[in-house]
Image (spheres, rainbow, N blue to C red):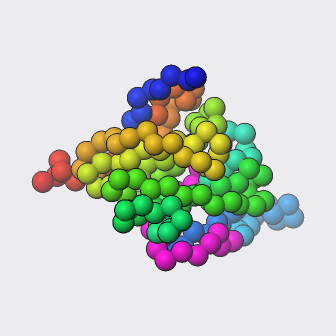
Amino acid sequence: MRASRPISLAILAVTLPTLISLAASSSTNSPRFSTRGLGVSPAYGEPSIAIARNGKNLAISTPGSDPKCKASGNGTVQIWWSANDGGSFSHSCYTSPSGGHDSEIDFLPNGTLLSADLEIADSYIQRSMDGGKTWIAVGPAGTEQDRQWLAHTPDGKTAYLVYHDFAAEA
């Protein structure tokens, strides 16, 4: 069993979950974009994307509303995850006590995927040990905030949550 570590945490943005990928054209060496919709749901907000060090796992998060994982009126975080470099995506979601707002995700070097769901009073942190398929609640972090971002040290032993502290501006 792995020991739990304290986590400090952070976020990104879009409307419908749409993956736009960029690759260099072999003939012109110019950027080439491709676009793919990932799903339709009644509500979306600012998304986030994370790519694992192995280059095969990637995940995209958006806030939303999914009756399959929604509990007691809370919003949900929608996760589209891929284990084959975006060749195909699967969907999962989770809810937090007062969340379903902006979301942020970050892969640690060991493959653990962290997520921060904005709850205004704080961010609710979750983690996935299987690339985004299932989620385990870690708990709240930070205070009265907006627009959070996640980052980590190169060895992944420390994760950071950075956010806009609007209470400090008052």
Q: For residue 31, what is the image quadrant?
A: bottom right
Above or below, 26 against 52 in this view is below
Looking at this view, is 59 or 21 the one in front?
A: 59
Query: Residue 87, percent across and down?
Result: 78, 59
Q: For residue 24, what is the image quadrant?
A: bottom right
- Left or right position of 88 against 15: right
- Left or right position of 21 against 170: right
State which quarter of the image contains the C terminus. bottom left
Toward the front, the furthest residue is 72
- Left or right position of 130 against 44: right
Above or below, 154 against 51 in this view is above
Query: Residue 166, percent across and down?
Result: 22, 53
Give the magenta range. Answer: 36-52
Query: Residue 147, percent across and down?
Result: 36, 55
Question: Does the magenta segment cover residue 37?
Answer: yes
Toward the left, the furthest residue is 170
Q: Main SS of the magenta segment? A: loop
Residue 150 visible in the shown view: no
Looking at this view, is 69 or 34 the one in front?
A: 69
Q: Residue at x 65, y 45 (%)?
A: 131
Above or below, 24 against 162 in this view is below
Q: Residue at x 28, y 55 (%)?
A: 120
Q: Residue at x 33, y 56 (%)?
A: 98
Question: Does the magenta segment cover residue 78?
Answer: no
Residue 40 visible in the shown view: yes
